Amino acid sequence: MQTWSLVSICVLLGVIVRWGVSLNSYSGAGKPPMFGDYEAQRHWQEVTYNLPHQEWYVNTTNNDLNYWGLDYPPLTAYHSLICAHIAKMINPAWVELHKSRGYESPAHKLFMRVTVLVADLLIYIPAVVLYCLYLTDGSAKKKVCTLLCFLLYPGLILIDYGHFQYNGVSLGLALWGVLALGLGWDVLGSLAFSLALNYKQMELYHALPFFCYLLGKCIKQGLMGRGLLLLLRIAITVLLTFALCWLPFLSDPSQTLQIVRRIFPLARGLFEDKVANTWCSLNTLIKIKTILSSDSQLYLSLVCTLLAVLPSSIKLLMKPTFWQFKLALVNSSLAFFLFSYHVHEKSILLVSLPVCLLLNDLPLMAVWILQASTFSMLPLFLKDGLLVPYAVTSLAFLYFSVYLLSALERCSEEELRLGAYRRLFFWLPRLDMACIVRWKFYICIAAMFALSIMSVAMVPPPRLPDLFPVLVSTFAFLHFLGSFLYFNMVQFSRPPSRKSQKKNN
């Protein structure tokens, strides 16, 4: 009973922080003619409510795809349609065809913010609560501490409740999939993740670990017996889920192909804005977009992504344990973020979710990466006028996570899984690697703090107008590249022993 009281307090704190951030500005506020992601979400409600589904993804006189055309799978469109029906009942002007373009008012802002909160309360937050209570080790107090830190992760809060998106829906559905697999409900897990994929195509970042874990489990059970039966049940569930989500569009193959073209926009380029991945960081030295053709860029990113994600996936396929599954989710999402085609800065949220799953197992490394992920989106937050909520939520998360999870105390070589590094660098003098990691953490946090202040307080030289965004993205990229190497090392190391787990608990 006491545990559930503490859980309720954590959820309440999470809701209060979210609502506090929602009182600030949003993407494109008062900036015609395109405005921003806030207007994009409102426009999708306008389109789905007023036009037949055959026109949602097609360029027509009533649906200009150059003005925030719908470019997510059908489940996003259905969600927009539900919100549009509610909006129509409150104020028809919010979704009036053509005339509502760029609509802004305090009442409409309140409505839009509430839709995000309701989605979180229905999908994301319950999944976080159940994961922390049933799939993390330790005492009830430790589970509650993990829950609070999970809910206070600032990156997701600032994007969904500041900038304005519904990432909590797709991430929440993916987390329901993780939860189901962790509890042994493989078919339900497949269903939940299929829904996540049908909400946002970027969930492909997590697809290979789900596929390899389930296939590996089926192989382990025997493909001539129980394993084959499980594989068939999973396959039927996935196919039926996709068929139901796409049912209104399946009657016309050309329409289905049009949706696929919309959700995979190959013409948009290798990367967008100053994103902290390999191609954007490399582009500061070698102008990849100028040297290589569009097709060459696409093939290069495809090959690099496959090469980066395959070792982790093969390891998971051979050893389908839940620990390996969590690490593979981190490694797969980092590989996609670092090397795949047309990556947004907000895509780092797809890395952050699996990292949050390791808050209880590897607290220092998880907190470090989550802090870097929020920092990597600083230029976007400054553009949206979210400096104060960025500073407050980042500092609060850093304080609570380090204190409640004892992150700086739980950083011995064994707890950080640094054995592989020790063996790799055996020729070096024996150093206290745990102490080195701790000092690197201090220095990196201080550097993030300094760069944040410089981005706000200093004016870049006229010849280098993007100096600070480039410094932020490059610094964050180095974190993500190092994290990718580290978590691959951990995945190929021995799993944590029961003895060390009990000591931590």
Image (cartoon, rainbow, N blue to C red):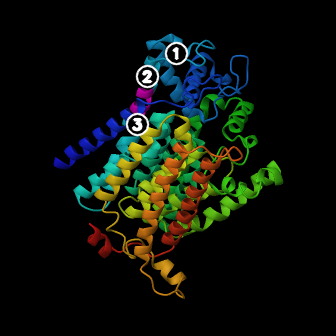
Q: Earlier in the sequence, mark 3 or mark 1?
A: 1
From what the image shows, is residue 38 above or below residue 264? above
Q: Between 284 and 313, which is closer to the camera in this rendering? A: 284
Q: Helix, strand, or loop for circle 1?
A: helix
Disc 3 to disc 1, how far (Cα)? 22 Å
Q: Point out the frontmost of discs 3 and 1.
A: 1
Disc on res. 94: 1
Q: Helix, strand, or loop for circle 2?
A: helix
User: For mark 2, what is the residue?
Assistant: 111
Query: Could you say where residue 220 lies in the image, as x and y percent from the top left?
Result: 49, 68
**In which quarter of the view is residue 481 placed?**
bottom right
Marks 2 and 1 close (CB-CB < 8 Å): yes
- In this image, 79 relative to 14: left or right? right
Q: Earlier in the sequence, mark 2 or mark 1?
A: 1
Residue in view at x 44 percent, y 70 percent: 437
User: For mark 3, what is the residue?
Assistant: 120
Which amino acid lies under the numbered mark 3 shown in the image of this protein? Asp
What range of the chain is rendered magenta? 113-120
How many neighbours does mark 1 have within 10 angstroms: few (below 14), some (14-19), or many (20 or more)?
many
Which amino acid lies under the numbered mark 2 shown in the image of this protein? Phe
Which amino acid lies under the numbered mark 1 shown in the image of this protein? Trp
Q: Helix, strand, or loop for circle 3?
A: helix
Marks 3 and 1 close (CB-CB < 8 Å): no
Q: Earlier in the sequence, mark 2 or mark 3?
A: 2
